[in-house]
Each structure stands twice: as C-alpha cells, then as structure tokens.
C-alpha cells in the first residue's frame, strides 16, 4: 500500500513539472559577431530572460565544428560549473557570472585563427523551457607592408600580346587581403587582350594569407610617363583599412616621329677658332635605333652629340640629325644651319713700305674682309692717330716717318681682331738737332764727350773731325724714332774745334764744338772744374753731294799750313816791324802765366788755336 502511494506521488509530481514546462518561456540575446586580433582575448556575452525567473537555470556553451557538429565546452547549473575536457579551448576559456542577473560571459584568451567559430549559448529553465543564441567569433591579422616590383627591361609598343608591367605582393594577413592596380590614380580593370591581372593566393602553415598580383598590358607611347602602383585593402576589427605601394615607371620603346638638332655652345654667334657642340634629340625611344649627325660634305658621326674643334668658315652649312628605326629601317630627320663668322687678315695699301719727300702727301688704306661690321683704328707709337679705313698724311716731315699700325676689330666679338703695319720713310737732307752746349772748357789731359743727334733719310753718314784735320772715331746708334746719335770721346791736349758732319744723298748738315784747354794748378782749397759756355751752335749747311765734305777738310788743312807759315815769318821779323816783334816776344816770354780765353767766334782764329795752342793778339 505504501509503495503504491509513493508511485502515485511521483506521477503527480511529473505531471506538475510537465505542466510548469509548458508554461515556461526562455529568451536568449547575443551579438551576431565578435571581432578581435589574433593573440588577443575575446569576450562573448550571453543575455537571457525566462518567465520562470533567472535563478536555477542550466547554462551550456557549444561551438560548431568545421563539420557542422556541436561541441560542448562548458556546463553550469545551480550546483556546479564544468569546463569540458579535451577540446582546443579547454585551457583558454573561462565563464564570468552565475546567470543570476540574466547575463553570462564566455572569455577566450590568446585567440588563434582556428578559433574563428560560431559559439552557442543554451539556457534551459526548470520547467524544460529552453532558449539559445549564437555569436560568430571573427579573428584578424594585419598584413605586412605591400611591395611592388616593375619590369627592368623596356617594353615595345610593337609587342602583340600584353607585356608584364610589374608585380605586387602583400604577406601575412588574415582574412585574405585584396590588391587593386592603379595607373595615374585610376583603377586598372582587366580587359581582354589589352589588360590582364593575375592574382595568386598562398596559405601559410600558420593559416595566414599571402597575396600576389601580376599586371600585364599592351603599352602605347602615351604610357611612357605613366606611374603605376598597388592599393591593398584588408579587414580589421570594426572596419576596413587601405595601404599603397610606392610608384613605378616603365620604359616604353617607340619609334621616333620628330628629330631636332641645335648648337648647344657657344650661345649666339660663332666665329672662326671657336669649338662648336652640336646636340641631337629624337622624340622616339628605341632600344635598337641608329642616330647620326652629318654635314653637307657627307661627313657623319654616329652620336647624339658632336664637338667640332677650331672651326673655320668652311664648317658653315646645314647639319642633319637622322634617326633610323632598325625594325622598319625608316628614317626621321631634322636639321639646323651653322654659320661661322670670319675676319680675314688686314691688308694695307701701299703693301710695302713707302718713301715720301718732305712736304709730300700720302693716303693709305687698311681693309679686312669680314662677315660682320668692322671698326678700324690707326696707331703710331702706341697712340691713336686716325680712325677709319683710310690714313691721310699731309705735308710730310721727319716727324711723319715711322711705323703705322692699323687694327681692325669686330665690335660684336670681344677679341676678334686683326692688324697690319705700314712703314713710312721721309726722304730729306740730314737735320742735326741743335745741342744744348757747344762751348766747353776742359783741363789738359781730361776727356770730353761730344754728342751729335741727326735725323734724315736715307740714314745719314756722320763723320767727326777736328780743326787740325784729324778724323775721329765715333760710336753711333739709332733710336726708335729714327734719330741717329753719334758720340765721340776726345782727350784735351790743346784748344781745338770739333766738327760733326752729317750727309746723305739729299744734302748735308754740320755743327761745331769749341773746346778750350786750361792749365790747372791744384791747391789745398781748389778743385779742378770744367766750364761749359752756352752759345748758339755754329751750323754749316749746304745742299749738294758728299764730295763737299772732302773739300771742307782740305780747306781746313790748307788754312792750318798757312797759319804756321805766317807765324814762322813773324818770329823771324820779316812780316812786321820791330815793335810788333817786341810785343810778340813779350807776350811769349810771359806765356806760362796766361789763362787761355775764347773771345772770338771767327772760324779762322779757331783753326789757329787748334794748330798752335796759343791765342794771336788782336789788332784794331
């Protein structure tokens, strides 16, 4: 009986519990996804409500395996908490909270890529009411910096198929990064037979992805300056990020359509003697093309630059630069004209030196052939004497004679000049430049230096002589102005006159120097001096031939002999009376006490002095 009662009691309780479960209502709320970086901690919250209240519920956590099955990882009720053993998450999960407040949180530490699963939270009420929620755990890994590598060789526009442009690569990302190619900031999309983008994906042992993308294109000339780069996009918790590679440029080979050639240096006008640097530029870019520069004479240089040294007017002409495409053997060319300015040597007319007579006139010209305007200046002795091509000399004198230099310059070019000279000689009899002093007093045995400066053309002959007929040795030299300077040194032994005689085919000129010999008795308070008496020089000038000089010398010798004879007769008393003889004897007896003076400019008396060394008494 007791056993039967117990059975009825259990059946009653089951009916009661079944009645309560039918009434219970459990509602679970969870996030759709939780996102974290690999290696971080993930927290998955499970919030629930129940019509029976939040106490005394059974809570379980599961994840869905790759095959779709549920794998329990956690169990909890009012009396116990249990982490399922033997799962990949056993050692890395924990649950916070008891569920008393309607919330419980599953924490996964050190999240790995394999943890990217769907997690299920199941809440069961006391009356068999059950609710569950699901959250997907998303795991992320930021990839490394992307790289780009362009082709190192050039690409021809004649290629039939798309040519490789470059390769972009990004490594170690999760989920898989995406690569997009850009040209000049514009996305590149695949186009059949024109643009081809080939991606490749590598899954590493760690589960991370490395993505590689190769771009190929058919290029055109317009692509030669294009810049290419890659954009990499990848997911991160809560969003999307982007990064770009560096820029690359490709070498495009294309045929030339225009050629230009020019003179790089010198800038502006060119003159003979310059060095010319010619440059050539083609708008094409061919790996195999021939570029050459040639002139009108057929001389060619296979280069883009040519240097012509020390050019002349013969180098003037048209220079052509030619570009030859070795694929089609078609030529494209351009040219420029080079003109070399010149200045020929100056030509002076009269060509040779010219001889003028005194008072005559001369017109000379100086010209130099030039491609530019010239400027001519005449110089004499370094001083400017005339401007222009013509030189006019009027009323010629000895001062007119000399060397005239004409200098022809080109004002547009500094240093571009030429010159020539004209030698002018003026014919005329000698002219002795008057000396400052012609009267000298010198002590016996002293030396006296006499100088005679002479002008004339043809160059005069200078001869020195003394009043006693002696011919003197002289030293002569001619200065730059054509003045001949003749110098003699004479030892004074008596009073004498020295003559400087100059002559040429047109005449003669002469000047005399009077030298008075003095005795000098040295005393303690006396010094010997020589006195020069300034006088107007005596000049002898005759027109005629050089024979006159010989006549003068003979006359001087005859006068000297006549003087000696007269003096001898006077001493014998046969020329004058007694009184005259006594006066003469008286003067001779006191000869040692007489100081010699020159009181007369008579040429004859000077001759007597040179012969006898004594002064004749004057007779009134």
Image: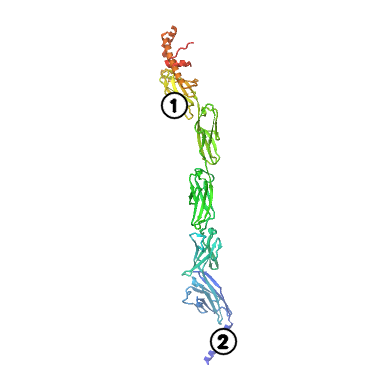
Q: Mark 2 vs mark 1: which is more N-terminal?
A: 2
Return the x and y of residue 240 as percentages of the image width and height: 55, 67
* Color style of the picture: rainbow
Is 555 placed above or below 276 here? above
Residue 476: which numbered mark, if any?
1
Is 578 placed above or below 418 here? above
Residue 417: which numbered mark, if any?
none
Left or right: residue 363 versus residue 441 is right
Left or right: residue 135 versus residue 564 is right
Visible in this render: residue 322?
yes
Residue mark closest to the camera, 2 vs 1? 1
- Give me the C-alpha separation between circle 2 and circle 1: 168 Å
Q: Which residue is mark 2?
A: 15
Badge 2 marks a residue whose secondary structure is helix
In this view of the protein, which residue sits in the foreground, 223 or 89? 223
Return the x and y of residue 209 as percentages of the image width and height: 49, 68
Return the x and y of residue 415 as percentages of the image width and height: 51, 40
Q: Residue 122: which quarter of the image?
A: bottom right
Return the x and y of residue 602 as percentages of the image width and height: 48, 16
Q: Residue 242: which quarter of the image?
A: bottom right
- Number of other residues with Cα within 10 Å of mark 1, as a class: few under 14, some 14 to 19, many 20 or more: some
Visible in this render: residue 538?
no
- Number of other residues with Cα within 10 Å of mark 2, as a class: few under 14, some 14 to 19, many 20 or more: few
In this view of the protein, which residue sits in the foreground, 63 or 247? 247
Name of the residue lying farthest toward the front: 297
């Amino acid at each position: 009986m007791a056993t039967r009662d117990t059975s009825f009691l259990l059946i009653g309780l089951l009916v009661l519990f079944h009645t309560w479960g039918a009434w219970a209502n459990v509602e679970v709320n969870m996030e759709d996804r939780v996102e974290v970086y690999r290696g971080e901690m993930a927290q998955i919250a499970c919030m629930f409500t129940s019509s029976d209240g939040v106490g005394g519920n059974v809570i379980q956590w599961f994840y869905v395996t790759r095959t779709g099955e549920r794998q329990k990882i956690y169990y909890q009720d009012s009396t116990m908490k249990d982490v399922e053993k033997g799962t990949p998450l056993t050692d890395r999960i924990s649950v916070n909270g008891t569920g008393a407040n309607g919330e419980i949180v599953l924490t996964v530490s050190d999240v790995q890529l394999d943890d990217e699963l769907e997690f299920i939270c199941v809440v069961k009420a006391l009356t068999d009411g059950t609710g569950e929620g699901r959250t997907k755990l998303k795991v992320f890994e930021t990839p490394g910096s992307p790289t780009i590598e362009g082709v190192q060789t050039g690409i021809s526009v004649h290629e039939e198929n798309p040519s490789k442009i470059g390769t972009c690569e990004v490594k170690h990302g999760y989920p898989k990064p995406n690569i997009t190619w850009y040209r000049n900031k514009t996305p590149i999309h695949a186009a059949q037979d024109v643009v081809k983008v080939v991606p490749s994906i590598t899954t590493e042992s760690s589960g991370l992805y490395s993505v590689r993308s190769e771009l190929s294109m058919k290029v055109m000339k317009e692509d030669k300056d294009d810049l290419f780069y890659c954009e990499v996009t990848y997911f991160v918790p809560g969003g999307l990020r982007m990064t770009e590679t560096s820029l690359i440029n490709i070498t495009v080979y294309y045929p030339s359509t225009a050629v230009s050639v020019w003179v790089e240096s010198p800038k502006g006008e060119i003159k003979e003697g310059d060095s010319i640097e010619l440059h050539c530029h083609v708008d094409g870019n061919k790996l195999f093309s021939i570029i050459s520069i040639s002139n009108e004479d057929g001389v060619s240089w296979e280069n883009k630059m040519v240097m012509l040294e020390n050019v002349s007017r013969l180098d003037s002409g048209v220079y052509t630069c030619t570009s030859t495409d070795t694929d089609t053997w078609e030529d494209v060319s351009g040219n420029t004209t080079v003109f070399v300015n010149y200045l020929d040597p100056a030509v002076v007319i009269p060509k040779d030196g010219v001889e003028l007579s005194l008072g005559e006139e001369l017109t000379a010209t100086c010209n130099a052939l030039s491609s530019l305007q010239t400027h001519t200046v005449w110089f004499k002795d370094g001083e400017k004497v005339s401007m222009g091509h013509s030189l006019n000399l009027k009323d010629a004198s000895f001062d007119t004679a000399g060397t005239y230099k004409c200098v022809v310059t080109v004002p547009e070019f500094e240093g571009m000049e030429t010159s020539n000279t004209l030698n002018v000689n003026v014919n005329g009899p000698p002219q002795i430049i008057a000396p400052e002093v012609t009267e000298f007093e010198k002590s016996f045995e002293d030396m006296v230096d006499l100088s005679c400066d002479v002008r004339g053309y043809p160059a005069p002959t200078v001869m020195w002589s003394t009043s006693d007929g002696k011919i003197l040795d002289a030293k002569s030299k001619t200065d730059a102005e054509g003045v001949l300077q003749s110098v003699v040194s004479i030892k004074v032994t008596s009073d004498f006159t020295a003559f400087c005689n100059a002559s040429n085919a047109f005449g003669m000129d002469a000047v005399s120097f009077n030298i008075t010999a003095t005795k000098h008795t040295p005393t303690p308070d006396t010094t010997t001096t020589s006195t020069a008496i300034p006088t107007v020089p005596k000049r002898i000038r005759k027109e005629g031939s050089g024979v006159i000089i010989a006549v003068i010398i003979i006359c001087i010798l005859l006068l000297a002999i006549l003087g000696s004879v007269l003096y001898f007769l006077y001493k014998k008393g046969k020329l004058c009376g007694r009184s005259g003889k006594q006066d003469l004897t008286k003067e001779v007896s006191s000869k040692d006490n007489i100081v010699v003076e020159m009181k007369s400019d008579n040429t004859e008396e000077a001759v007597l002095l040179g012969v006898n060394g004594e002064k004749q008494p004057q007779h009134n």
